[in-house]
Amino acid sequence: MTAEALARLPQDRIQTITPDNQQGRPVTYKVVLGPDRTTSTEFARTTMATVSTLLVAIVGFYFGQRATSTGMDKGVEAAKR
């Protein structure tokens, strides 16, 4: 890979760069790139959104059921009087 091509690579994905000097030829580089992390980032965002939505639904159901139960108990007590 030439220096011009190396400059166009995404810098956050480069793991190693090794110059390859052969006599009579321009300097080239051997480059090892790491994986693209956009897919794993999107997966993490989607997972967090799903888990937080489930948590809100469970907590809302718990407190809603509890409030209804308390209201029913007070209603039964008032009806007995």
Image (cartoon, rainbow, N blue to C red):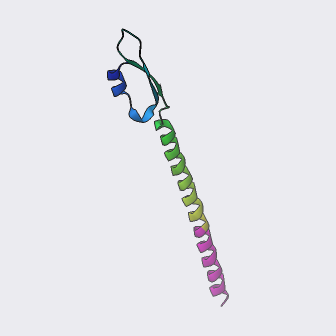
- In the displayed orientation, state which residue is furthest to the right: 80
Residue at 62% from the left image edge and 82% from the top image edge: 74
Indicate whether residue 69 is drawn in magenta. yes
Give how far across and how far down residue 15 sits, in percent.
Answer: 48, 31
Relative placement, left or right, of 7 versus 49 is left
Give how far across and how far down residue 14 sits, in percent.
Answer: 44, 31
Q: Is residue 62 above or below residue 32?
A: below
Indicate whether residue 73 is drawn in magenta. yes
Of 26 and 65, which appears nearest the observer?
26
- In the displayed orientation, state which residue is furthest to the left: 4
Of 14 and 42, which appears nearest the observer?
14
- In the displayed orientation, state which residue is furthest to the top: 24
Picture quadrant of residue 29: top left
Picture quadrant of residue 22: top left
Of 59 and 22, which appears nearest the observer?
22
Relative placement, left or right, of 55 versus 39 is right
Boundaries of the magenta span: 63-81
Give how far across and how far down residue 57 sits, in percent.
Answer: 56, 59
